[in-house]
Amino acid sequence: MSTVTSKDGTTIAFDAVGSGRPLIMIDGATAYRAVNPLNAQTGELLADEFRTYAYDRRGRGESTDTAPYAIEREIEDVAALVEDAGGGPAVIFGWSSGGVLALDVAASGLVPVSHVAVFEPPFVVDDTRPPLPSDYVEKLDAAVAAGDPGEAVAIFMTDASGGSREDVEGLKQSDFWPIMLGIAPTIAYDGRIMGTTMSGNPLPADRWASITVPVLAMHGIDTWPTLIPGPKALAELLPTATLKPVPGENHATTPEVLAPTLREFVREA
């Protein structure tokens, strides 16, 4: 494990493998290196051409955190990683809500970026699933402030992920429950990143309008149907974006699929 220090003093822990063009892998809500090995495994498959960074987003795993939270702080975290890699320009990849952060990184102008790739950003742009409640982030903040991280996890699982309270009770019986409690304060971070993009309305026309680099919007061929409209909407919104269905299901794909897809995208775009 290595670390970098972000602009506000937060320590960001990461593993890096390979040499060449920097590739920063951004996890979605609740995920980090210890529970998601896909980033590191993808990096191993790309080690001949990329220096791939798998890192713990602030407040998770072995990274620290600094209040107050702002999306800009997470952009600065990515900037610190790119600087560690030699300054870029970097390929930025994100899973789920991490893909939305990847788009924000590219749009910020604070990080030199050559390509952006996202896998199933969970936008809600139609009526294929209920929209995120307008008070979602407020409810998460209130649960954490009340010392009830379990309720924050339950809100995420039901309001954002479409599960039931029975699903929550089942998770409480698993070894993963303590892990979820540990990262519960960071769930609201991703809620802020998603913003209004899960409201059932079209994506905001201006949020990523400054992106001029190639963008790859992916979804699994056999994923949950509610996760397909989001990548499609992004590909239709951004002039530099391409939609690509890839083998995968249930909001995930494999390193054996992701690595060659990223390699081809960067070589050809």
Image (spheres, grey):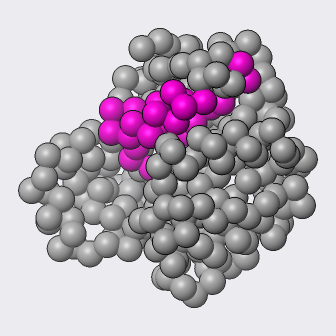
In this image, 132 relative to 269: left or right? Answer: left
Residue at 14 percent of width and 64 percent of height: 170
Where is residue 156, by image quadrant? bottom left
Residue at 55 percent of width and 14 percent of height: 4
Residue 44 x/y as whole percent: 51, 27
> Is-magenta flag for residue 105?
no
Q: Nearer the viewer, residue 210 or 95?
A: 95
| Segment tinted magenta in the rendering | 20-46
Residue at 31 percent of width and 56 percent of height: 152
Residue 85 x/y as whole percent: 68, 15
Residue at 21 percent of width and 65 percent of height: 168
Residue 151 x/y as whole percent: 25, 59
Answer whether residue 233 is visible to the viewer in this image. yes
Position of the N terminus, as image quadrant, is top left
Answer whether residue 69 is visible to the viewer in this image. no
Residue farthest along the left direction in this orientation: 173
